[in-house]
Image: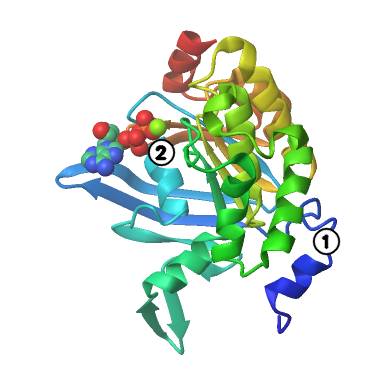
Amino acid sequence: QGQPQTNAAAAAPGWAQSAQRGGVVEIHAVSKRYGSNPVLHQVSLTIPAGSVTVILGPSGSGKSTLLRSINHLERVDDGFITIDGQLLGYRQSGNKLYELRDHEILAQRADVGMVFQNFNLFPHLSVLENLIEAPLAVRGLSRAEAEALGLELLARVGLADKADAYPRQLSGGQQQRVAIARALALKPKVLLFDEPTSALDPELVGEVLDVIKELARSGTTLIVVTHEIGFAREVADRVVFMEQGRIVEAGSPEQIFNAPAQQRTAAFLGKVL
Ligand code: ADP
Ligand code: MG
């Protein structure tokens, strides 16, 4: 508070490595429909700061919609979401709520990083340019600060030598590691992963999961939609199974994978395990 972001960044190196503050996500009875098609039904979930939550479920069960709602890419129809007690999309004044303006929503969204299945890098920008674009625009860093941060993040994902490469020159696994570094560049409180390895050739999955595991150890709050059960067993604090827009059950990996309480969970796991 009080200190402009630029000064905090100037105190880097270490900015990219430092533990993220906070990151408690609370989802309260969130419902969402597309036209007349209900997609989320009163979904409630609390995600503690620094924890790793894996969301599993069949295609069409609302996993992406839930992640997109946490990142303001979707507006929920009912219920609400808070991050560290801050209501997404609204500002409270007295006992009144005001909708945030677009620039305020952008600022709030910067606290939530998102990594997509298909990397979504800017093809016409070099790796380093991909990394510095948002810190320059959103966090107000100088170019020198943003480049120093970008290089530090590239080293963290094992791609220090790729700063000047273009996305098309990289493997899918390398592109996804750049996408993770780019998400980290805004120093988010929460990182969302939507099937981050689903588009990768099998031999490239491990290098991306290893980067996510390293983030998990560093204490960033992670929410990961994935079908990688081995990863979930090893890394997740909590596994959530969704079906048809509802949370069917949630528990520790041991409980969900070894002794699911719900028949629907067992049936799904029987197909993916
Ligand atoms: P999942 O990620 O679990 O596969 P999604 O959240 O992508 O599920 O989709 C849940 C449901 O919402 C599906 O029936 C899907 O067809 C529908 N849906 C998703 N996005 C849109 C959209 N932008 N417009 C209309 N329907 C959508
Ligand atoms: Mg999806």
Q: Which residue is more in the foreground, 109 or 133?
A: 133
Residue 121 percent across, percent down from the top left: 50, 39
Can you give x and y, in whole percent of width and height, for residue 106 in the image? 46, 65
Query: Assess mark 2: CB under 8 A from ligand 2?
Result: yes
The residue that appears at 63% across and 57% down in the rendered structure is 186
Judged from the image, the secondary structure of the residue bearing numbered disc 2 is: helix
Which residue lies at the image location 39% right of the left edge and 74% below the top edge? 100
> Against 128, is 195 above or below?
above
Q: Which mark is residue 12?
A: 1
Q: Going by the image, does 221 lie left or right of 66?
A: right
Residue drawn where x is 53% and y is 43% of the image: 125
Which residue is more in the foreground, 91 or 159?
Answer: 159
Q: Position of residue 120 (x, y in %)?
A: 47, 38
Ligand 1 found in image quarter: top left
Q: Which residue is mark 2?
A: 64
- In this rendering, would 137 be left or right of 7? left
Vertical relation: 269 (above or below) 185: above
Q: Assess disc 1: are there few (<14), some (14-19) or many (≥20) residues with their C-alpha within 10 Å of its C-alpha.
A: some
Query: On screen, 163 above or below 170?
Result: below
Q: Nearer the viewer, residue 189 or 24?
A: 189
In 3D space, how far apart are the residues under numbered discs 2 and 1 (Cα atoms)? Answer: 34 Å
Type of the residue with mark 1: Ala
Give the quarter of the figure containing the N terminus.
bottom right
User: Dot 1 lies on which element?
Assistant: loop
Q: What residue is drawn where x is 37% and y is 75%?
A: 101
Looking at this view, name the residue that lies furthest to the bottom. 94
